[in-house]
Amino acid sequence: MSVSISSLQQLLFELSGVLPADSSPLFAVTRQVKLHANETYIREGDKDRRLAYIEKGIMRAYTLKQNGDEATLFLRWEKQFIASHDTIIHRKPSRFVYRALEDVTLLEIDYDILEEVMKVHPRFEPLRNFFLLRMLSESLAIMEAFVTLSPEERYRNLLAERFDVVNRVPDKYIASMLGITPVSLSRIRKRMLEKGK
């Protein structure tokens, strides 16, 4: 059994009290997906309702602006879930591209199949609520951070949450996610060094 399945079984138990031994109907319909660095997982316009748990690697969600620049929406890394909000919540084609920044291993389930499993096994229902609430809370957190925090504060939060991720992601993507230019990110880092933090 892989580490990711064990982690998900533990999460399922914490959410709904389903014992690992009873979770086989759910994990029977999951599959492992491996992506190479820069490989696209979900394309703009895709309608597949994929939900995946990241076992290894970093994923980036982004869109192309009218001027051709890429705007990074968010990054996801180990022990986080990734899915298109558009396809899962709104049942619309994805507006964003989801791409591997490095070699990635995912544990994936088709959300439509997950819903069928939950009809037969309602004890898994808390898992769906968890996914939807997690997606909503992550979206709200991004929006609130842009409204209430400065770019430097958002950068400090990223460092506090996952310091190692900053060293694994190109500066241009970090800057884009913070809503600033790479030059501005360099200035923030310089100020932080001067302050000794």
Image: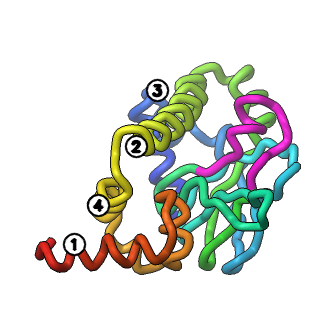
Residue 93 on the magenta segment: yes
Confirm or deny contact between disc 2 and disc 1 (CB under 8 A). no
- Amino acid type at image mark 2: Ala
| Image-based side of 82 in relation to 63, left or right | left
Q: Who comes first in sequence, dot 4 or dot 3?
A: 3
Looking at the image, is mark 1 or mark 3 nearer the viewer?
1
Question: To which residue does mark 2 refer?
Answer: 145
> What secondary structure is marked by label 3?
helix
The boundaries of the magenta stretch are: 82-96
Report whether 169 appears left or right of 86.
left
Label 1, secondary structure: give it. Answer: helix
Mark 4 → mark 3, Cα distance in angstroms: 34 Å
Give the CA distance from mark 3 to mark 2.
31 Å
Amino acid found under the numbered disc labelled 1: Met
The residue pinned by badge 1 equals: 192
| Label drawn at residue 16 | 3
- C-beta proximity under 8 Å, tags 1 and 3: no
Q: Give the amino acid type for the residue marked by disc 4 in the picture.
A: Arg
